[in-house]
Image (cartoon, rainbow, N blue to C red):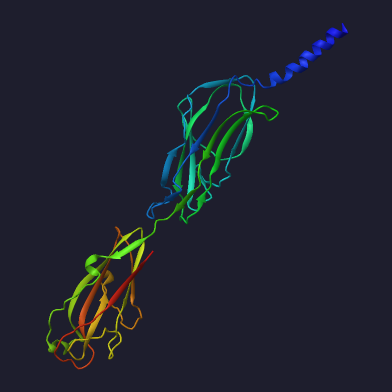
Amino acid sequence: MKPSISRLLTLLVLGLPIAAQAECDSYMDSEHGLSLPATITVPANLPDGSIITQQPFSGVVPGRFFNCHSLTLRQVTSRRYPQLLPSLIYSTEAPGIGIRIKITDARGVTNFYALENITNQLPTGRHPIFTNAEAIFYKTGPVTGGVVPAGSIYKYTMMTRIGQRLGRFELNLNNSVRFVSPVATCNLEAGDVNRSIALDPVQVSAFNSSPYAGAHNFELTANCSDAANVTFRFSGPPSPENDLLFANTGTAGGVALWLYSRINGTNQTIPANGSDNERTLVVSGNRAVLPLGAAYHKSGTVGQGTLISTATVNITYN
């Protein structure tokens, strides 16, 4: 009897590892990669919460189901990104860039999945495998050129009770991606780059009852791309008699140029002496239009002749 009992015990001990690995009749086992451009430009006018790009991970696994006869250990490991509640959008390493992951299973059902680290047990029964996935990147705030590094984003692993891997579903970013804001540009409209403003002739007597005469309205236009604001800065030689006015190099005595802005219908002097000589406008429809006016202005004893005056404008933008 003793040899027989000894052999029976040996068979039982050898059989235990086989039973420990038989939680399910099969497992999912696939890896999917996402390749994006090395640099992605995020439009400056894109509202926060908007989608920047939406791309599928590589590969689609044929849909099937597997059966588990006992509780099966499963572990989810992912990038520990802060969640932007209440959505499943997560802040990435790149400032102003968020991400969501959509996964489809064998039923054809697609859901957003949390990027978290958990370990728990898959219940017994019939389960669908994951077949494919998609990543969605969002603008969540100011974009400052940060990088989302390559590597694993989400991994779902099924294991034995002793930690042996049985199968997994893994999503990887194949390359690092830098998210940048576009470079803003603004240029004066072609006709405004070197422009002559003609004032109508006036009589010397026009200055008997007013310090200025012959007012003429015009506009300067800046055409922009991805700029929010434009600043027009004026300069030029001031009149010796009144440095708020631009000097006259023509033949008329006692007269200089009065240059003024007309923003919101209010005439405001643009001085030639460098003080208060900037006007900043918000870009709308990729344009910033500055309403201006020019007129003859008395600077001394007015005499007949011509008015020739030069003012230079430079623009800056952001």
- Residue extending farthest to the top is 1
Res. 266 image quadrant? bottom left
**Which sits in the foreground, 291 or 137?**
137
Q: Is residue 260 visible?
A: yes
Assign the N terminus to one quadrant of the image.
top right
Q: Quadrant of residue 191?
A: bottom left
Q: Which image quadrant is residue 160 in?
A: top right
Q: Let me know if residue 94 appears in the view.
A: no
Determine the residue positioned at 39% across, 59% down.
183
Residue 199: x and y in percent read 16, 78
Q: Is residue 208 left or right of residue 270?
A: left
- Count every numbered label the image shows and give the total: 0
| Image: 250 above or below 147 | below
Q: Is residue 85 above or below residue 155?
A: below
**Which residue appears at 88% of the width and 8% of the height?**
2
In the image, taking residue 210 as reference, residue 284 lies left or right, namely: right
At which x and y percent is residue 72? 64, 26
The extreme bottom residue here reads 301
Residue 259: x %, y % from top left:
25, 79
- Please tell me which residue lies in front, 237 or 259: 237
Which x, y percent locates residue 47?
A: 40, 51
Q: Residue at x 32, y 63 (%)?
A: 186
**Image: 164 above or below 312:** above
Q: Quadrant of the C terminus?
A: bottom left
Front one among 213 and 195: 195
User: Quick check: 73 left or right of 276?
Assistant: right
